[in-house]
Amino acid sequence: MSPIPSAALSQRILPAATPPELLRNFCIIAHIDHGKSTLADRMLQLTGVVDARQMRAQYLDRMDIERERGITIKSQAVRMPWELDGTPYALNMIDTPGHVDFTYEVSRSLAACEGAVLLVDAAQGIEAQTLANLYLAMENDLTIIPVLNKIDLPAAQPEKYAEELAKLIGGEPEDCLRVSGKTGAGVVELLDKIVATLPAPTGDPDAPARAMIFDSVYDTYRGVVTYVRVKDGNLSPRERIVMMSTKATHELLEIGVISPEPNPTQGLGVGEVGYLITGVKDVRQSKVGDTVTNASKPAAESLGGYHDPRPMVFSGLYPIDGSDYPVLRDALDKLKLNDAALNYEPETSVALGFGFRVGFLGLLHLEIVRERLEREFDLDLISTAPNVVYEVTLEDRSVVTVTNPSEFPGGKIMEVREPVVRATILCPSEFIGAVMELCQTRRGDLLGMDYLSEDRVEMRYTLPLAEIVFDFFDQLKSRTRGYASLDYEPTGEQAADLVKVDILLQGEQVDAFSSIVHKEKAYAYGVMMAGKLKDLIPRQQFEVPIQAAVGARVIARETIRAIRKDVLAKCYGGDITRKRKLLEKQKEGKKRMKTIGRVDVPQEAFIAALSSDGGGGKDAKKK
Amino acid sequence: MAPALPLGDEAPDDGALPPSVLDGADARAFGVYLHVPFCTVRCGYCDFNTYTAAELGGGASQVAYADTALREIALAGRVLTRAGVPPRPVSSVFVGGGTPTVLPADDLTRLLDGVRGTWGLAPRAEVTTEANPDSVTPGSLAQLAAAGFTRVSFGMQSAVPHVLATLERTHDPRRIPDVVRWARDAGLDVSLDLIYGTPGESLDDWRTSLQTALATGVNHVSAYALVVEAGTKMAGQVRRGQLALPSDEDQAVKYEVADAMLTEAGLHWYEVSNWARSPEHACRHNLAYWRGDDWWGVGPGAHSHVGGVRWWNVKHPRAYAGRLEAGLSPAAGREVLEPGSARLERVMLGVRLAEGLPLGELSARARRDVAGLVADGLVDGSAALGAASTPPRVLLTRRGRLLADAVVRTLTD
């Protein structure tokens, strides 16, 4: 008997007409590299949604960047038929983003499901982000199916990690399914178990429609494609719908399910998952977490849980070639259509020219946006060291929100508040000391520590987000030989003893290098940046002091000694032309330099000073 | 390997000059440079256009060279006449190389006669030849003087044996006082060429060289910072780590030491790398380069300038000879200076001289920048202000001379 339902049975699970008890909505929670996409591919094949000929690796990850980096940025939902004990079922697999920056999107994806497959690499064990998402799923009351993947690997230790999982979610180690997405082993059993153990969705079919948006994607040809999970009532083609947060109404131009390509349907009923197209052109008009209802019979209350994405990390993005500024502006305008969390404002820098101050959900978000700008729009960009948002209260009680360190107010400051996060770090127990030392130097407070197994430990810290943004992940990885994993979520803010360190070149402030740091670290930052600039800025005709200052107080100083010799001894045999052409070339080079006061600085020096460290993008990539 | 020729326009086969060269020709001195592209050995640091017998192989022989160069002198005479340049007797002749004195004194005499026959020599014309200290004798120097040479410039480079060895100079430094005396006895004015900043040269070594040169009582010294040119044997030694690249700091200190010692001894700078006991002892041919005068460069790879047209000859002696035998100009390329380039050159060349560059020749913006250069100690403040007898001018300080190119960039923004 094939687990794929026959044509006759399939009539019972038609979209818009499937009884909720025949639906199963689930997601897969996994760490990057633990094989989620490969397992999803296998499910698509076994359910007959994709045949082997159509199959390509990581079928669901559409964007090139996603496929190359092996990560999923945007979630999608695929409807798959399955038969168990003679009954047909429709399974909706909702893909979740797997990264810390997208916690809110993950939470909305989880809210669209009744269950989650917890997928863990049998050779590596659970990682911090997976753990964080698992906790999120458990808070949402999802039924968890623990699965160990990659059991075909020689390094697999299924017994060890089954025990770890049992400890985390309760139950017995034997309950843990063992699969191999690569060979397909155990995947049929997993599909059966999804049907058998996950609760069917429930809802009131006669109530006004309430559908939660769990994703929203801009498509060049179709406009915004919105992914929804229907809780109550039903949605039909051509009816008018209302977005409950904005009260905006739209006509449903198309409604359907993905299997795995979009199939228009006669609507979506209780418990169903699918997509809507209304013709809007900007994902901000179709916000993740919002509730969709019927315009003719609107629901009184939304499903709740909606909030606007809030940028946590800011960075200045500048085109290396100043004439690319309009290209950058257009590129950001385009990306914004597909990224509700992206926001930006123009800014100018003495050192870097015209650019934008861009707000991001986190470091990975920053890195992805930057990479897309460079790749899809052929831009060469320079980004300033990422910083967080500070609330500065002045003595007159006025409050200034600082998203760019160079705008940190001078004068009398009563209090500075900075965002803090709750960080979870998983690592082998031999590295506890190293992690503690790192967190201590980063102003961390240990909240608690638990052993996941004999030799793996979970440590929980409160840390200033600014400390994580600056080089934390690289440091963590290098101190734990790559074994530690990290997750964090914003938990609020705290007052802290923070100061702005300015870098002055011959007395002139270089805005791009101003940084807000803890008082105790001001000196180290000043020495580091002054030293770096000393090595990068070419010698001038005069001595150039580089100073790091807090307010009017100089805390570190370096000096670029004046250049001693810049003259050709002679013109060989009267070859004046050669000498003039050399000078012309030097003059061209000088034109490309930025002048700070009287100091000529090649742009490469700024780029090198900004990119060598302190650029947080790098570390996010490895997560 | 000789330095690459500049990129320029094509030069006409007949060497014809545009009418623009006539502008102000009366006011410009006219000189002749004669290039002798031969040496007995090639020194490791040298990238001049010169060839040893072995490098040259057959053809283009030294023996035939004077005849070939005389053909170019004749061509030069015709080209200038045809262009309508008013006849100007030659005010300076400079024979350089290579090693001019590897040619028999008779050949040098014939070349000078060729110049004299074509344009005539001005009264008290300066006629210099470069010479290697180990390739002259009292007799050969007397013969040069008799032929009309007035000045000899010896490639002394250093008085310190290990420095000369690094430079691969073969002469015995102990000969220097002798050759200077012989030249003087022959009635020739003498200049000594020195090089500083050679890998391994200490500051004391450099002082020794300066003292040795000054002890001869010469009236003129040229001191050049060693430049390790790409493609030379020395560049290879530096690349392989066998020699250390001279540092700017070391060369700057040595320049300052040289300027101090030479000034102390009564020799005053008149150009960044040249010092003379009095204005009459300054090398007029050298000054002509910096003042933008006209000169015709004869010989393979030689550069010429006439009224805003610069050109350069084909580099290889065989190609050079071939062009002339075919009745063609040996020029490989040329450029007719645009006004912007001409202004840049004027500043670039003018500031190198102790006579200074009149402020009036600068743009209004550059004139304003002079104040900053004075404040930085690169330009002499009182010269920039001027006095009743001397108009305001840009005169480099000692530190400014070491940064002359930076000053030029500032003044030509």
Image (tube, rainbow, N blue to C red):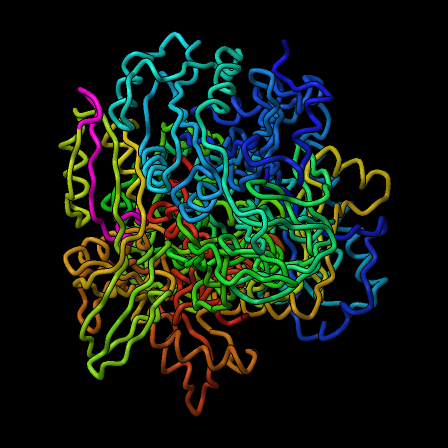
Could you say which is closer to the camera, residue A213 or residue B12?
A213
Could you say which is closer to the camera, residue A557 or residue A269?
A269
Q: Position of residue B39 (x, y in %)?
A: 55, 33
The residue sitting at 67% across, 37% down in the picture is A15
Vertical placement of residue A590 versus A86, above or below: below
Task: Give the side of residue A151 with respect to residue A340, left or right.
Answer: left
Taking the magenta stretch, the answer to whether it contains residue A462 is: yes
Task: Give the side of residue A343 with respect to residue A531, left or right.
Answer: right
- Region rendered in magenta: A451-470
The residue sitting at 31% across, 44% down in the picture is A488
Q: Quadrant of residue B54?
A: top right
The residue sitting at 42% across, 32% down in the picture is A29
For the C terminus of chain B, give its image quadrant: bottom right
Task: Give the side of residue B120 with respect to residue A506, left or right.
Answer: right
Q: Position of residue A351 (x, y in %)?
A: 43, 64
Q: Does the rendering let one see residue B93?
A: no
Could you say which is closer to the camera, residue A314 or residue A72?
A72
Vertical placement of residue B341 versus A272, above or below: below
Q: Position of residue A384 (x, y in %)?
A: 41, 56
Assign the magenta stretch its main secondary structure.
strand
For the N terminus of chain B, give its image quadrant: top right
Q: Position of residue B145 (x, y in %)?
A: 54, 50
Taking the magenta stretch, the answer to whether it contains residue B358 is: no
Q: Does the rendering let one see residue A424?
A: yes
